[in-house]
Amino acid sequence: MVAAMTRWIALSYLCLGLCLDLCLALPAAAQAPQAGNLPADFYPRPNCVKPDINKVNRMDRDETIRYNRQIKAYNACAKAYLVNANNDADYVLALMNAQVAIANGEAVPPITPGPSNMPADFYPRSACLKPDKAAIGETPSTQRVPTVAATGKPATADGVQAMDAMAAYNQRVTLYNMQLVAFNACSKDYIAKGRIDIAHIQAATQAAQ
């Protein structure tokens, strides 16, 4: 006997945007922790050799000329290192902002690294996988389904199918929500570690100044 009409409820999927600043400020080098997306010592120190002016006999013309040549080479080396380090920090920052764009469903701008102190593509791209909302599918019909009063189960075959469809849909929604939460946590971790790696680059540049 049909005693009631039941509406099977669809779960809602999450729409979690990644609330992160797109214009990430570079942290102070002194505050750099020891763990990032790369080892703490990943960034090379400058190999520019600064001549010692205290060892120059200023009365010796040849020594003065040699010192001037060496200090000029040192300045050029240090300048190139600092410019490249700034490019490397910008590259890391661009990858971080790319992850923010992916999380927010926005287009990722092209990333073009400049001259670098590191090998090409030295910085790892995020391995965070964003779940596909389309995999959830359309919400099944939520028309009222007649049920048996004694059991609360659908009274018709169509009702059983509707219940099964809704249960499967809700399972997909639950899975999507879990994957999205994991994706956002992964993205935030990647970006937080990116800030640390930029701080390591900054710390390395202190030796060149």
Image: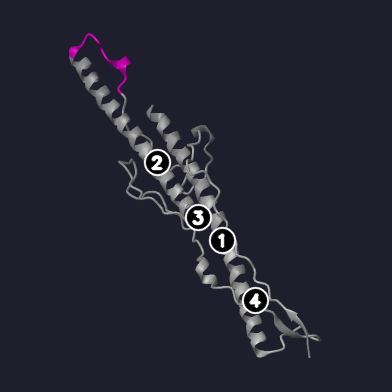
Secondary element at image label 3: helix
Quarter of the figure with the C terminus: top left
Residue type at numbered disc 1:
Leu
Gap between marks 4 and 2, in whole Å? 51 Å
Task: Give yes or no for residue 127 being in the magenta stretch.
Answer: no
Place of residue 126 in the rendered image (x, y in percent of width and height, measured from the top left): 46, 55
Sooner in the amino-acid sequence: mark 4 or mark 3: 3
Q: Which residues are magenta?
A: 51-61
Residue at mark 3: 103
What amino acid is labelled 3 in the image? Ala
Q: Which mark is residue 142?
A: 4
Residue 54, compared with residue 180, is above or below; it is above
Seen as rendered, the residue at the extreme right is 150
Image vertical order of residue 35 relative to residue 161, above or below = above
Secondary element at tag 2: helix
Instruction: Give the crowd class for mark 2: few <14, some 14-19, many >=20 residues within 10 Å.
Output: some
**Gap in Å between the C-alphas at discs 1 and 4?**
25 Å
> Which amino acid type is shown beneath numbered disc 4?
Thr
**Disc 2/disc 3 C-alpha distance (Å):** 20 Å
Alpha carbons under labels 3 and 1: distance apart: 9 Å
Residue 176 appears left or right of 155: left
